[in-house]
Amino acid sequence: MSLQHCRLIDLPKVHDPRGNLTFVEGGIHVPFGIERVYYLYDVPGGSQRGGHAHRGLEQLIVAMSGSFDVLLDDGRERRRYHLARSYYGLYVPTMIWRELDNFSSGAVCMVLASNKYDEADYYRDYAEYRAAVLQP
Ligand code: TYD
């Protein structure tokens, strides 16, 4: 996987004077079945989250409220995304290193994930991750 496989996905938006509505269907709006949802909130200013890659997990990261940055790294190059609205998300395929920072006050980061939590799926050491992706 490379940064070329990472992309922003526009989600459906149902405009309504009573308030807008966005929905996500697994296998339709995201290229995986949704097996788990988790969210980061009450993030203190200056905090960094992430700092890992996943062997087999795919994710869609959405700023449900406020904003934050997601730095993606495929072992060769890095790209920084600023997420600030809840009607699009950042698709992160397998084997991409990610770091999240620059959280605004009140930011909520929701993640849709293709599998249940499994610590064995994580690379938490950047050198180990990089060696794995760069091996011939
Ligand atoms: P981690 O994935 O490292 O958080 P982040 O990438 O957002 O910084 O997870 C932090 C802790 O939470 C870790 O001890 C594992 C636990 N955790 C679960 O138990 N279930 C989950 O679905 C997730 C995402 C984390």
Image (cartoon, grey):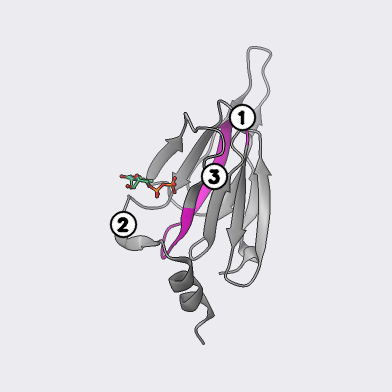
Q: Is residue 120 left or right of residue 65?
A: left
Residue 32 versus residue 129 in the image, above or below: above
Q: Position of residue 53 (x, y in %)?
A: 46, 61
Please indicate, yes or no, whether residue 114 appears anywhere in the rendered image: yes
Q: Amino acid at mark 1?
A: Gly
Return the residue at label 1: 66
For mark 1, give the secondary structure. loop
Q: CA distance from mark 1 to mark 3?
A: 13 Å
Q: Earlier in the sequence, mark 1 or mark 2?
A: 1
Residue at image location 46% in from the left, 76% down from the top: 132
Q: Nearer the viewer, mark 3 or mark 2?
A: 2
Q: Position of residue 23 (x, y in %)?
A: 54, 33
Q: Position of residue 125 (x, y in %)?
A: 43, 65
Q: Which mark is residue 61?
A: 3
Q: Amino acid at mark 3?
A: Ile
Q: CA distance from mark 1 to mark 2?
A: 28 Å
For mark 3, give the secondary structure. strand
Asked whether mark 2 lies closer than 8 Å to ligand 1, one says: yes
Residue at image location 55% in from the left, 69% down from the top: 1
Say which of 48 and 25 sits in front.
48
Q: Which mark is residue 119?
A: 2
Say which of 51 and 121 sits in front.
51
Q: Amino acid at mark 2?
A: Glu
Q: Which residues are magenta?
A: 51-67
Q: Earlier in the sequence, mark 3 or mark 2?
A: 3
Please indicate, yes or no, whether residue 29 appears anywhere in the rendered image: no
Q: Is residue 84 left or right of residue 33?
A: right
Magenta includes 55? yes
